[in-house]
Amino acid sequence: MDEYKSKQVISYVKWLTPEQGGRKKPFEIGMTFTTPAIFTDFDESSGLWSVNFEVMEFNNDYSGMLKMNFLFNNAPEKYLYKGNKFSILDGPKCIGNGVIVDDTRLVE
C-alpha cells in the first residue's frame, strides 16, 4: 500500500496586531503550531479541521509566510489551492488572514 503524503502549501498571511486583537507575542521563524482555519469557500458540512502551520517569515508590518497542511489525512484537501483565502483562529477569535500562494508541495 502506498504511504500517505499530505499536501503542503505556502501562504502569505497578514496577522492582526495586538491592538486589533491579535497575539501579543510575535511569531518566530521556525515556530510551528496547530489551530483551526476557516477557508473562504468553507462548507459547514465539512466541519472544522485543524491545520499545521510553520512560520517561514515574520515581518515588522505583521505580514509573513507560512507552510501549512492539514493535521489529519482524511481532511478536505480540496481547500488547499492557490488563491484560496483563509482565516487563522486562536480559540473563537481570528488572529490573521491569509491566501495560498503555492500549492505544489507534498510532505511525507
Image (cartoon, rainbow, N blue to C red):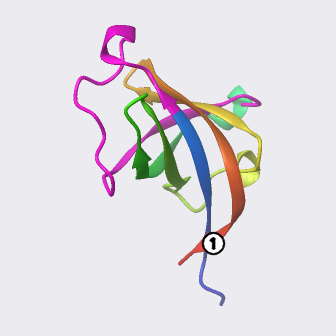
Task: Give the residue number, with chain letter if any, for mark 1.
Answer: 106
Q: Which residue corresponds to the image point at 55% horizontal and 53% vertical from the top-left?
A: 70
Q: Which residue corresponds to the image point at 36% horizontal and 12% vertical from the top-left?
A: 21
Where's residue 50, x and y in %?
Answer: 48, 44
Number of residue marks = 1
- In the figure, is residue 25 to the left or right of 36? left
Question: Is residue 5 shown above or below 19?
Answer: below
Where's residue 56, x and y in %?
Answer: 43, 54
Where's residue 81, x and y in %?
Answer: 76, 50
Residue 19 colored in magenta in the image? yes
Q: Which residues are magenta?
A: 14-42
Residue 40 colored in magenta in the image? yes
State which quadrant residue 4 falls in: bottom right
- Taking the view exactly as shown, the residue that stands out farthest to the top is 19
Q: Which residue corresponds to the image point at 48% horizontal and 27% vertical from the top-left?
A: 96
Kind of residue indicated by mark 1: Leu
